[in-house]
Image (cartoon, rainbow, N blue to C red):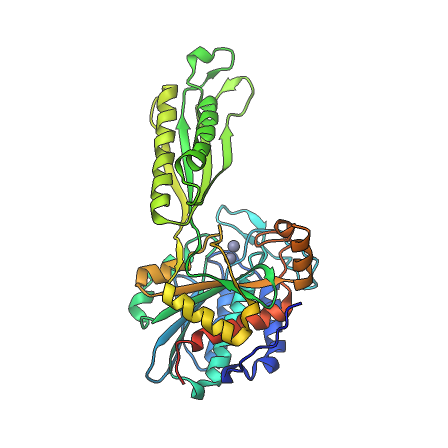
Amino acid sequence: MVNTQALSSDPALRNLDGMLPDLEALYRDVHSHPELSMQETRTAGLAADRLRAAGYEVTTGVGKTGVVGLLRNGEGPTVMLRADMDALPIQEATALPYASKATAMDREGKTVPVSHMCGHDMHVTWLAGATKLMADARTSWRGTLMAVFQPAEETGEGAQAMIDDGLFKHFPKPDVILGQHVMVGPAGTVAGRAGAITSAADSLQIRLFGRGAHGSMPQASIDPVVMAASTVLRLQTIISREVAAAEAAVLTVGVLQAGTKENVIPDEAIIKLNVRTFDAGVRKRVLAAIERIANAEAAASGAPQPPEITTIDQYPLNVNNQDAAKRVADAFRGHFGAERVRETGPAPASEDFGSFGSEWHVPSVFWFVGGTDPKTYAQAKEANKINELPVNHSPKFAPLLHPTLRTGVEALVVAARAWLPA
Ligand SMILES: [Zn+2]
Ligand SMILES: [Zn+2]
């Protein structure tokens, strides 16, 4: 079991116990009212109301539904804390009493189930709690606290939308940008590292052009099915033959579509793939290899025109600044105790959080907060079945409310206080 008794008692955390019932109510409310990417108006409204009530200057509608709260509290550094707000088009299967029954219209006009299966409802609640505690304890620190509630992380658009909407122009440049994500891991613990923390992700579509014909006369065709099959197999040699053992990367073809009938050779085929990389050089090399292979396979088939390669979405590499990550880890160890602070490898998950720091040229730190029942986690580890625990985006992803709620609030406050002097 994890002993969740903190070692230090920051003045800002003194009111946390009393605030937990209210935060739990907020969490259940956001959980049962999830909103799809760029539709987070209700959630943004809740965040803005709470920031205003706590005394923040609030700007809404930044990058469509984003919310920025500023608490100017005298001379000192500026710390930006970020939470994402969007949910996913997934039918929740947790059986929680507050499980989502919501549906919404997606961008194609389809009605889809919606649920917080990535835990962004937890992120919203953490930031609401931390900003209130810091406001209540403003006599114990100085500087500026900037809270950013971001839309559309799941589509990779939200951070960029806020940046494009003038985030860097209208708000003070922070000295550090901090963010966190609930993940599989013992509840009550935090995990982080210096350097790359989440991978870059590139989703691409490759449209291969052939020439259709009757299935009985392949000689009249340029068969895009064979072209696509060959391309998929060759693409798998990029990671196995062109990326060194120490340079991790993932390439998954998730969509392979062609044809409508068994005796008709179609005109074209579609491949959709996803690439994860942890290094800018490796990313460039893998993307170039994909283009080279797609073009060469099309040429080998005698395709009437080269394939059309388009980007579906893109997430930047999320790199924790060395010094800032060390400062956060030291603060965490001082507060939580060393046994509750885990060192983790870079996660093959992706996040647009990294855009804020890399484009504003500000050091940023991102870490994970465990949300799994520690007993369940320990049993799964013992049985070598960690991979079978419900992860983010699973319809059964359900963070253990306590102590996950408290741990995330503590982590934000403790990390912010590492920059904001008394
Ligand atoms: Zn997600
Ligand atoms: Zn997420």
Q: Position of residue 211 (x, y in %)?
A: 41, 20
Q: Position of residue 366 (x, y in %)?
A: 45, 63
Q: Give the answer, above or below, for where 398 lies relative to 211.
A: below
Q: Residue at x 38, y 30 (%)?
A: 294
Q: Residue at x 36, y 33 (%)?
A: 308
Q: Is residue 383 left or right of residue 248?
A: right
- Residue 310 occupies quadrant: top left
113 or 369: nearer the viewer = 369
Q: Residue at x 49, y 85 (%)?
A: 136
Q: Is residue 89 left or right of residue 152?
A: right
Q: Position of residue 139 (x, y in %)?
A: 43, 88
Q: Is residue 130 left or right of residue 171?
A: right
Q: Position of residue 68 (x, y in %)?
A: 41, 70
247 or 297: nearer the viewer = 247
Report the residue that reaches farthest toward the bottom: 139
Instruction: Quadrant for the N terminus, please.
Output: bottom right
Q: Give the answer, above or below, for where 96 lies relative to 261.
A: below
Q: Would residue 412 be visible to someone looking at this image?
A: no
